[in-house]
Amino acid sequence: MQREALVPGVTDEEEMCRLMDAYSGALLGVCTLLLNDWSLAQDMVQETFLRAWKRRDYHPESEKAWLMRVAVNLCHDYHRSRWFRYNDRRITPEETMASAPAAFDSEIVQLVRQLPLREREVVVLFYWNRMTAEEIANLLEISRSAVYRRLDKAQKHLKLEWEGEGQP
């Protein structure tokens, strides 16, 4: 049984290539900052697109938000796994900066990487991927006020670290 394409005259393979071209960079950046491991982040992006391929008959309103949700959930699943507890997740600054936008200062990236996961994910989604609080709330399945609380807490933490007051 042939499935009807999302865009008439476009094959599933062409649609998947379009999604990969449009969103792989953003997904890689989010996964890199959430996992602190560039090669693992690449694996998560690949897994994200594999899941998108398997669900290619599903057409969400916002494909970017849906792909981000899949990627973030995969990162959360990895954090809950036994392997995560025993794996050396260090990443070199060069690898981090290879996937970070040029506007990011390497010191800022390092400070963001040190944030707790709950705060780090909202910072990355809000500031790096320019998602709205509503989109982040839907993606993480939390309230919009929880997004703002996490952002506020992260901003305070980053400000203390930036000013050097976070060190004992």
Image (spheres, rainbow, N blue to C red):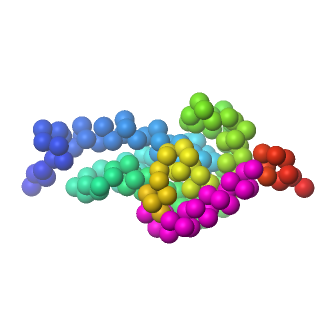
Residue 13 picture quarter: top left
Q: Is residue 111 magenta?
A: no
For the point 75% across and 50% down, the residue is 159
Image quadrant holding the C terminus, namely bottom right
Q: Is residue 144 magenta?
A: yes
Whether residue 58 sits left or right of residue 40 in the image: it is left
| Residue 52 x, y percent position in the rendering | 33, 52
Whether residue 32 sits left or right of residue 9 in the image: it is right
Residue interval drawn in magenta: 138-159
Residue farthest along the right direction in this orientation: 168
For the point 82% across and 46% down, the residue is 163
| Residue 102 x, y percent position in the rendering | 59, 30
Q: Main secondary structure of the magenta part?
A: helix
Pick whichever, 142 or 155, lies toward us. 155
For the point 61% across and 58% down, the residue is 151
Whether residue 54 sits left or right of residue 45 in the image: it is left
| Residue 75 x, y percent position in the rendering | 53, 56
Total number of numbered discs in the rendering: 0
Pick whichever, 92 or 132, lies toward us. 132
Image quadrant holding the N terminus, namely bottom left
Whether residue 113 sits left or right of residue 47 in the image: it is right
Residue 2 seen in the current view:
yes
